[in-house]
Amino acid sequence: MHSEKPKGLHELCGRAMVLWPVAAARQAGAGRVVVVDSSRRALEAILPEGVELVVQPRADGTGGAVAAAMAALDAAPEAELDAAAPVVVLSGDVPLVSAAAIGELIEAHNASGAAATMASTVLEDPSGYGRVVRDADGAVQRVVETKGQGDSTQAEREIREVNTGIFVFAAHALRATLPHLSTENAQGELYLPQVLDLLRAQGAHVAAHVVHDQRLVLGVNDRAELARVRKLAQAGIHEAHMRAGVAVVDPDATVIDVDVEIGQDTVIEPFTTIRGATRIGRLCTVRHSYLVDCVLEDGASVGPFAYLRPGTVLRAGSKVGTFVEVKSSDIGAGAKVPHLSYVGDADVGEGSNLGAATITANYDGRAKHRTTVGRRVRTGVDTTLVAPVSVGDGAYTGAGSVITEDVPPGALGIARERQSNIEGYSERRDQSQ
């Protein structure tokens, strides 16, 4: 990846890449999920509750990683694995594997009675993948790695069926063979697929389950491949929302993160980006805007060119319009912030209307302060509300006012110099030049 950031932490549609297979495993009903990390423990801070972290003592390959995980599983007597229990191995850089695909792999494994079943797929360009070598009967003979020239022959490199890095093993078979892995290969690593060779040598049945949807098993080795996988992931997110009743007008011009929730009959217009854990209700409209970690209740409207930052809540039927930025604020039901305004650290009451260029001055250089705007308030154009300050229910502010003191309910707050007109100013100015 040419990055200081570990590969698994690179972001994919709002979620660290390694968390995609973790989520799939949990959705597939895994009893325990173990993530193997390096001694840096870079993944520890992002793992969901209930997911275990195991450190691989040294970077000695996929076989060493699985051996570390099995040691952790066996170290917990109260959760001891049944000898025939399926142990599924997923790769943190194969992010699009689905719960359904995992379920199908386990089903195929159980049906075949195999000691091990690998998920394979056929690629037009298999570069970088281990190749699946089959015998005359079509059974898996071995997996040939292609990282180094000494690992494979030219004929083997021409094979298009590849190892996806996804396996299911009978627990006893995996436990018995891991200690016998060898580093006698071009990379000097413990290759997990060697387990298949060892099992076949013992007369055990090794099966392969071909995954026909190649998108589910594409690996990520660099940023170009990450971009390709991101495009596929994004298409899947869009499709899921559209099939649930959301109108994504132009999916190619829309970005929606994986954890975003959107209600039925909401319209997402082109050039919109919705990030993080944003939740959007039913019958909303979002036009050409950027939303991050915010909440829109039913019937809310956003944009165009709005920026909703974390902590923003738009109540039912409210509106944030053109060139408006909102941060850590609660915009009440039916309230409107139509255009050219900044609302930060504020509570705006039901039915209020903030005039163009209304600004909440929420930071005094040392601390943030909140602004409270009551119900049915009308602020005049170019009003600045200097927090902490409150504007009572039904109150008004005059255009161009800088409000530094509370405005009582029903009052009109005006804070500006009286206008003075200097007659003949332009003529005198011209004469002085």
Image (cartoon, helix red, strand yellow):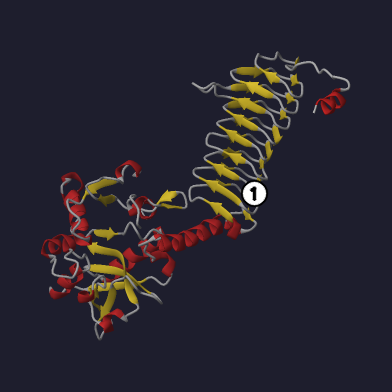
Quadrant in the rendering for residue 313? top right
Locate residue 251, reporting x and y percent.
Answer: 59, 58
* Residue sitting farthest toward the bottom: 136
Quarter of the C terminus within the rendering: top right
Q: Is residue 225 left or right of residue 85?
A: right
Asked if residue 154 is positioned above or below residue 115 in the image, the reply reads: below
Locate residue 121, reporting x and y percent.
Answer: 36, 72
384 and 56: which is toward the camera: 384
Q: Residue at x 20, y 61 (%)?
A: 63
Locate residue 367, reporting x and y percent.
Answer: 50, 21
Asked if residue 334 is positioned above or below residue 179 in the image, the reply reads: above
Q: Is residue 162 left or right of residue 359?
A: left
Category of crowding for the residue at label 1, using alpha-carbon neighbours closer than 10 angstroms: few (below 14), some (14–19), many (at least 20): some
Q: Residue at x 58, y 39 (%)?
A: 308
Q: Residue at x 34, y 59 (%)?
A: 93
5 and 231: which is toward the camera: 5
The kind of secondary structure element at disc 1 is: loop
Q: Amino acid at mark 1?
A: His
Q: Which residue matches tag 1?
A: 288
Locate residue 385, reporting x and y percent.
Answer: 65, 22
Q: Is residue 426 left or right of residue 209?
A: right
Quarter of the N terminus within the rendering: bottom left
Q: Is residue 254 left or right of residue 123?
A: right
Q: Residue at x 62, y 26 (%)?
A: 360
431 and 250: which is toward the camera: 431
* Residue sitting farthest toward the left: 180
Quadrant in the rendering for residue 298? top right
